[in-house]
Amino acid sequence: MEYDFNTLKKLYNRYKIKYDEKSKEYQIVDQGNGMIYNFSGIGAEKVKFAHFWVYASNFNRSQMGQNKDVNLAFSDNLREVYNIIMYTAVEAIQSYGHLCRKEVFEDNLSSNTIYVHAKDVVEGLYSKENGFRSFEIWCQCAAKTTNLGDWLQHNK
């Protein structure tokens, strides 16, 4: 599935975001071939969200080294949290045309996961305007291409 947890991890691992001192702009760098991409458009928003996921998954937690941040962000606990968040988001967008309030995500997470920091992830997703925008775009794209029945089957 194009918007599943593994795709998110692949985007994070393949593309890095860096600030170019010369142009004074952020760029996306393909780690495989070194190609540099603009920091705008749907593709860039997907990469931004993959990186923002790492931030959000560590929100309100003590600072750890970069590797531990990534390990936590793509752990089995966070896979479960991601799947609940995405199911909730896609269902809301397909039903109402927009994302739901963060309280809806928090309620669904507290009902469906035992991961202690699940609500912190939602807080992280809503904490920064640019990051939230990439989350929203990711969810809108997923809602256009996702059948919720298939999503449930694929993410058991």
Image: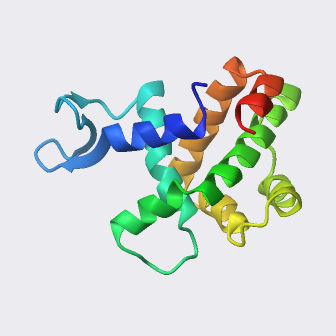
Q: How is the image coloured?
A: rainbow
Is 12 situated left or right of 88 in this image? left
In the image shown, does 13 or 52 lie closer to the viewer?
13
Is 126 situated left or right of 11 in this image? right
The quarter of the picture where the C terminus appears is top right
Residue at horizontal 34%, vertical 35%? 39
Q: Is residue 45 above or below residue 61?
A: above
| Residue 3 drawn at (x, y percent) | 59, 31
Residue at horizontal 83%, vertical 25%? 149
| Residue 59 drawn at (x, y percent) | 56, 69
In this view, which residue lies farthest toward the bottom?
62
Q: Is residue 126 visible?
A: no
- Determine the image quadrant of residue 23: top left
- Determine the image quadrant of residue 78: bottom right
The quarter of the picture where the N terminus appears is top right
In the image shown, does 9 or 138 lie closer to the viewer?
9
Q: Is residue 15 above or below residue 33?
A: below
Q: Is residue 20 visible?
A: yes
Is 12 situated left or right of 23 in this image? right
In the image shown, does 97 or 14 lie closer to the viewer?
14
